[in-house]
Amino acid sequence: MSTGKIEEVKGEVPAAGDVSVKVDPTPEAGEMKVPEGKGAVNAPHTAGDNEEQLPKPEISSVLVQQVSRTKAEAARNKSLRAAGKQSKRDKEEEKKDLLESKDEHYIPMDELCSRLGTDLEKGMTNEAHQAALEKWGLNELTPPKEKFWLLVLLEHMTGFFSLLLWAAAILCFIAYGIDQSSQDNLYLGVVLAAVVILTGLFSYYQDAKSAAVMAGFKNFLPEKTIVVREGKEVEVLATDLVPGDVVKISNGVKIPADIRLISEDEMKVDNASLTGESEAQKRSAKPEKEGSQLLEARNVCFYGTLCVNGSGYGLVFATGDNTTIGTIAALAAAASAREDAETPINREIHHFIKIISAVAIILGVTFLVLGFILGLDALETVVFAIGIIVANVPEGLLATVTVSLTLTAQRMAHKKVLVKNLESVETLGSTNVIASDKTGTLTQNIMTVQHLWYDGKVHEASEIKDKAEDNKDVSFKRFKDCFALCTTATFKDEQEEKDQIPFQARKVSGDASEAAMIKFMEPVLRKFDTSIVTERKYNPTLFKLPFNSTNKFMLHICQMSKDYDDSLVLWMKGAPERVWAKCDTIFIDGKAVDKKDYKESYEKGLFSLMNNGERVLGLSFMVLDKEKYKEGYEFKWDGDYGEESTFPHTGYTFLGLTALMDPPRPAVPGAVRSCQTAGIQVIMVTGDHPDTAEAIAKMVGIIRDPTRRDIAAREGVDINEIDPEHPEIGAKVVRGVELGSMSDEELDHLLDYDQLVFARTSPANKLTIVKAVQEKRFKRFKDGRPTKRVKNIVAVTGDGVNDSPALSQADIGVAMGVVGSDVAKDAADMILLNDNFASIVDGVEEGRLIFDNLKKSIAYTLSSNIPEISPFLVFIVIQIPLPLPTVLILLIDLGTDIIPAISLAYETKESDIMMKPPRDSRIDRLVTRKLISFSYLQIGVIQAVAGFYTYFVVLRDYGFPADQLPFAQELFFDFADLGKDSDQVIFSPDPNDTIGATKLQVKDNDIQLVECNITDSEICHIPDEALTHAQAAFFVSIVVVQWADVLACRTRRLSIYHQGMRNTVLNFGLLSETVLAVILCYVEPINVIGTRPIRFVHWFPAMPFAIIIVVYDEIRKYLIRRGPPKGSKKEVNLVEEYTYY
């Protein structure tokens, strides 16, 4: 029997099952009587009796199946353990055996107490607690293993690319050790080592910053919790709890361990972080059925979840890593440690290094063989072979990649996305499947009033709120009163009122449904110069009947002050069918009329609201006779259905319906469309109810075609009568229990659907889905298109502990920063600081942009390899004086080229970046044959010709014609060693007239000279100075053609005209490389490195080639944009097929 008195649990621990009555403001939507007519049988289930009848997912058993082993392995391990041969893996299996045999939720309480050595009334003794603490350890999850900072730093300095540069540096040191006559190789080796160290330090710093932000996310257990020790309630550290402790749980407290309830008082817990269920879950102290699953047990509260209503006492049976969350965290850690956990960009860089290394080694060995064949000096040949290998290594590219990733991470931070791992930025751009959680990611995680049904019509809540002051109808007035007076939720913080925080964003003390109701009604009441607090003050509640799972409604009797002639009014809200059954009349346009005339209207309204996946509550009222129920009257509710109550239990007037939902975030539908346009499949994977999940999926655009339920509703038949393979079904909604019973082949065929929703999924279900999508190799189409090979890159979003294994398994895990659990954040690669799915689309765009821009940077950087390598090849083959020494190559790669290469990371997206399908990682590699062809055989060749042309022009201007240069390299070297005043250096015809000389003899070699176009006595006909000027001019020519190259590489398809010159960093890069070339050439002290102040006219020979590069590339892109000729069966034309990189 319930009365108006409310008792509280305090002091001693109540005996099991002794539950006091407490007001619970949480009516739940209940079962629905199926209205007659088409589609009625397909009415969605809601939280209530129908929910109880649903088959429940075997969460624990599926989880165990994932982390456990086959029966054969189990038998083997058992025999090994029996023989005393227990490996480390066997010990892990033994732990999993324990997980599989969890029975603490259904064995008799006495047996559990005996097992744990405790007493329900007195709790543990201090001695028993100390012994248990030594046995079980502290009640905390073992944090993920953190590597020593020095090891992390070394990892940053020994990546694939870094190792290539280390190898190049070592080769340089070897070359210097072989030939110490020149210090060029020593300088180059030191600089290469410095590049690796500096970029390693830079990337380590970026990751350390992200790690520092992560540390700030940690939500530790409450420092203290109330426990019963030796018969007394004491406050202890939560970390000191052990199995066997009796703890007290109250509203708002985080559950400190896995506990079995001894008693509870209308207790509800928020299990969203564990199971994904958005609704608070009712708890009960009743034992569960033998063999039932732990995660489905109503008498268990799990470590890390939150008590949101009521209170209770519980017996701790698992702490720390042995808790359910600890088990899932271990599963996540196992997924993180998988052998193939390599990011796509890492694989691409590895692939690129293989190509570059192969090219470098082939050229170096070829050069070495040619040198020996031609009879060159063996020592000199080896040194130059090393030079060729080093010249092939794009020394500045490591810095470019690191800076590009860092810049993108910084841009992502501005968009509220924290990047924990720099390489994961590009992974998101490669993604072609996103498996997203629902609650808090696609939705706002805020229960909101969506619709009202009264006067026989469905009304949009937002429209009513906006026009509240114009709404004078009596029915809406009753709604206002019922919302205010038949709820107990209150706004928590008075400071939020002073700060004028929007009502929707304010904190509320109470159930989520009531929070939604008062957040909706408070701004409405304010327009009428009142508030919920004011209404409750002037219309005090005399009697409260709290919601319970039997009645499925709550009831308040209030003393009304106005508009009701000071009468008492009974207000009720709860499951629609229960409230409707209590009513004889319905309130229509201010009058109570027979409800029979509106039954069909009511059922249609109810069905339409529930079919949207909304949580529906019924409202009713009754005006009580103030003469009969005078002041001091004792109200009592008694009997199975209230038939023995001291006030009417039926005959009420039905007021209407209110429908609530956790609505989609406003930006999500557009973000989902953007993903679909970009060729990315969005799958919903949630622990919530299938009907709610399906409704939200339709709202955001994940489901666009008919589901099995839609077809059943249309045809007016039971859903089980519809063939699961019905040809009209375009979208699938699959429950976790169905997933668990599927074979691998059935699951693979299920994944052929583009529109998929997985509901009521367990952590292991989510992990299974992610693995299946990753392992899928072929996509079959229903529309007759041929089967397509696929290589899926999967992104997973989630916030709960239940999401962490899937987050770890995914190619990229994205956790929520606001509501996300610590375990989920640790498992993820990225964290959405605003919990908004739309930020993922920004991430995809940034990821694609970074891949495009890295391609551009590589294309730009590799182009200069040909003019850098070809001088060595020509030098060895026809033995002309070396056109470009190693030091000048270094000045190009780490000097003039570095800023323009990095500037391409700032390049804005091309207009079609989100219109293209995701790249196929098997075909569209970072470095492809077409890119190598573009950089080496197209642009690179033009640059090499420009360099040689400039080189020959300069030597000709100083009296050395091109036809005399083959096989003249020994003469140039000997002259440099001897000097022009040596007796072995003879100018003809007049030895004292170098400018007028027509022939030069050095030792036994001679060369024909021509008249100098530039008669500088220090250079004209002076081989070493003329050659140094020619080498400096070759260097400058590369700078000039690289101007054109960086402009050509800015886009892969668009014209420079369309892209514009808005990249200020690139503009600065063009200026900086020019200024640097000028400084290197014209600042005299720097000339010791091999540069010279070349004549201004020698900047121009390369310029026509720069123009050729730009014109050629613009024509190439124009032909690509034109597409294939009309009537062609190909999707691309020949130019795109062979040159689009």
Image (cartoon, rainbow, N blue to C red):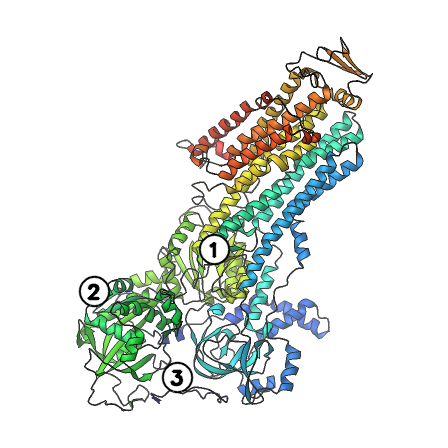
Q: Where does residue 791 sit, x and y in percent of width and height? A: 53, 49
Tag 1 secondary structure: loop
Viewer-nearest residue: 1029 or 748: 1029
Quarter of the picture holding the N terminus? bottom left
Q: Amino acid at mark 3?
A: Lys
First in sequence, mark 1 or 3: give its number.
3
Q: Amino acid at mark 2?
A: Asp
First in sequence, mark 1 or 2: give its number.
1
Q: Which residue is mark 1?
A: 416
Q: Where does residue 736 sit, x and y in percent of width and height? A: 46, 66
Q: How far apart, in angstroms, are the residues tagged by discs 1 and 2?
A: 40 Å
Q: How many marks?
A: 3
Disc 3 + disc 2, Cβ < 8 Å: no
Q: Where does residue 834 sit, x and y in percent of width and height? A: 45, 59
773 above or below 311?
A: above
Q: How far apart, in angstroms, are the residues tagged by discs 3 and 2?
A: 39 Å
Could one spot residue 752 in this view of the protein?
Answer: no
Viewer-nearest residue: 224 or 118: 224
Which mark identifies residue 22? 3
Q: Which residue is mark 2?
A: 470
Viewer-nearest residue: 770 or 1093: 1093
Tag 2 secondary structure: helix
Q: How far apart, in angstroms, are the residues tagged by discs 1 and 3?
A: 42 Å
Could one spot residue 1064 in this view of the protein?
Answer: yes
Tell me if mark 3 has few (under 14), some (14-19) or many (20+) residues whose alpha carbon lies within 10 angstroms of its own: many
Q: Residue at x 68, y 56 (%)?
A: 151
Tell me if mark 1 has few (under 14), some (14-19) or many (20+) residues whose alpha carbon lies within 10 angstroms of its own: some
Viewer-nearest residue: 681 or 453: 453
Q: Residue at x 39, y 86 (%)?
A: 21
Can you tell which of label 1 and label 3 is closer to the viewer? 1
User: Which residue reaches farthest right?
Assistant: 983
